[in-house]
Image (cartoon, helix red, strand yellow):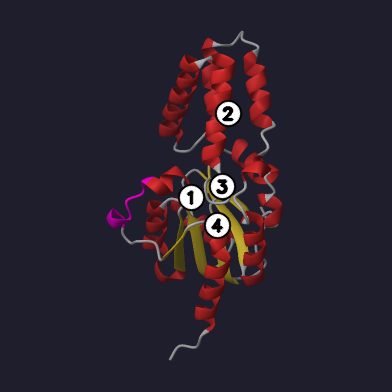
């Protein structure tokens, strides 16, 4: 993980799943592959194991769920095929339109940094194999609960102002309550979490909402112009 050499003016903090890449599509592909290899009942058992593990550790862990799933299938050769499928999944195909172009544009305005949560094997793999790691110049942070790790984030990437982009408005609200006016929150309406969100019940509400990640380029331009304007 590359640190900033000095305090930046603006750091753009970017979520990964359903913000830069379509993780819902990955889950659908995994469900289809599990059904094909193991049948519907075993597919449902995998997802039950996955949900139980996520409740325990606090983040999505597809490989960890596979380790638990194998306990009743240890002799089945399909397990090796599933392992290979996960480790060779083409995550670059899941990037939302203009995702990498948006990161490139943000780097002309400030510094783009990935702020994600997840496990410490598969999540970094997704970020690197999709091309996101290279696009942000290796500036990647992965925590169990990113909204609880803002001190560590600020220590590694100090900035006068932060812009957080995420598909979960409740996380944006939690971060805004901690950083206040030093943080601008941007809700991107992509994925099932965004579709299910009840914005009326979330306080504080996101500062801005966009329909897709490519819209962030124009919004970021406007935010930077506003910050550059002299205070009357």
Nearer to us in this view, 145 or 128? 128
Badge 4 marks a residue whose secondary structure is helix
Up-down: is 178 above or below 34?
A: below
Question: Residue 213 lies in what quarter of the image?
Answer: bottom right
Look at the numbered discs 1 and 2 and tell me whether their residues touch, using CB distance below 8 Å. Answer: no
| Mark positioned earlier in the residue sequence (3 or 4) | 3
Q: Residue 229's x, y, as percent?
A: 51, 85
Q: Is residue 4 visible?
A: yes
* Residue at the spot 57% in from the left edge and 31% down from the top edge: 29
Instruction: Determine the residue located farthest toward the bottom in the rendered image.
Output: 232
What residue did someone put label 2 on?
63
| Mark positioned earlier in the residue sequence (2 or 4) | 2
* Residue at the spot 58% in from the left edge and 18% down from the top edge: 36
Q: Is residue 139 visible?
A: no
Up-down: is 110 above or below 34?
A: below
Instruction: Magenta stretch: give its range.
Output: 196-202
Badge 1 marks a residue whose secondary structure is loop
What residue did someone put label 3 on?
142
Alpha carbon distance from label 1 to label 4: 8 Å
Badge 3 marks a residue whose secondary structure is strand
* Residue at the spot 66% in from the left edge and 56% down from the top edge: 100
What residue did someone put label 4 on?
213
Q: Which of the two discs, 2 and 4, sits closer to the camera?
A: 4
Question: Residue 4 lies in what quarter of the image?
Answer: bottom right
Look at the numbered discs 3 and 4 and tell me whether their residues touch, using CB distance below 8 Å. Answer: no
| Mark positioned earlier in the residue sequence (1 or 2) | 2
Instruction: Determine the residue located farthest toward the left in the rendered image.
Output: 201
Alpha carbon distance from label 1 to label 2: 24 Å
What residue did someone put label 1 on?
190
Alpha carbon distance from label 1 to label 3: 21 Å
| Mark positioned earlier in the residue sequence (1 or 4) | 1
């Amino acid at each position: 993980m590359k640190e900033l050499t000095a305090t930046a003016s603006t750091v753009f903090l970017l979520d990964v799943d359903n913000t830069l890449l379509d993780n819902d599509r990955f889950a659908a592909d995994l469900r289809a592959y599990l059904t094909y290899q193991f049948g519907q009942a075993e597919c449902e058992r995998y997802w039950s194991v996955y949900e139980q593990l996520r409740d325990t550790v606090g983040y999505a862990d597809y490989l960890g769920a596979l380790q638990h799933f194998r306990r009743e299938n240890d002799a089945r050769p399909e397990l090796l095929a599933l392992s290979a499928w996960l480790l060779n999944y083409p995550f670059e195909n899941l990037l939302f339109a203009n995702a990498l172009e948006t990161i490139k544009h943000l780097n002309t305005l400030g510094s783009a940094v990935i702020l994600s949560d997840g496990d410490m094997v598969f999540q970094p793999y997704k970020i690197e194999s999709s091309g996101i790691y290279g696009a942000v110049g290796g500036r990647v942070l992965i925590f169990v609960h990113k909204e609880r790790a803002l001190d560590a984030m600020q220590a590694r990437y100090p900035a006068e102002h932060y812009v957080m982009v995420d598909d979960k408005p409740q996380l944006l609200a939690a971060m805004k309550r901690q950083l206040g006016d030093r943080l601008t929150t941007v809700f991107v309406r992509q994925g099932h979490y965004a579709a299910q969100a009840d914005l009326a019940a979330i306080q504080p509400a996101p500062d801005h909402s966009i329909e897709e990640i490519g819209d962030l380029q124009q919004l970021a331009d406007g935010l930077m112009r506003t910050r550059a304007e002299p205070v009357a």
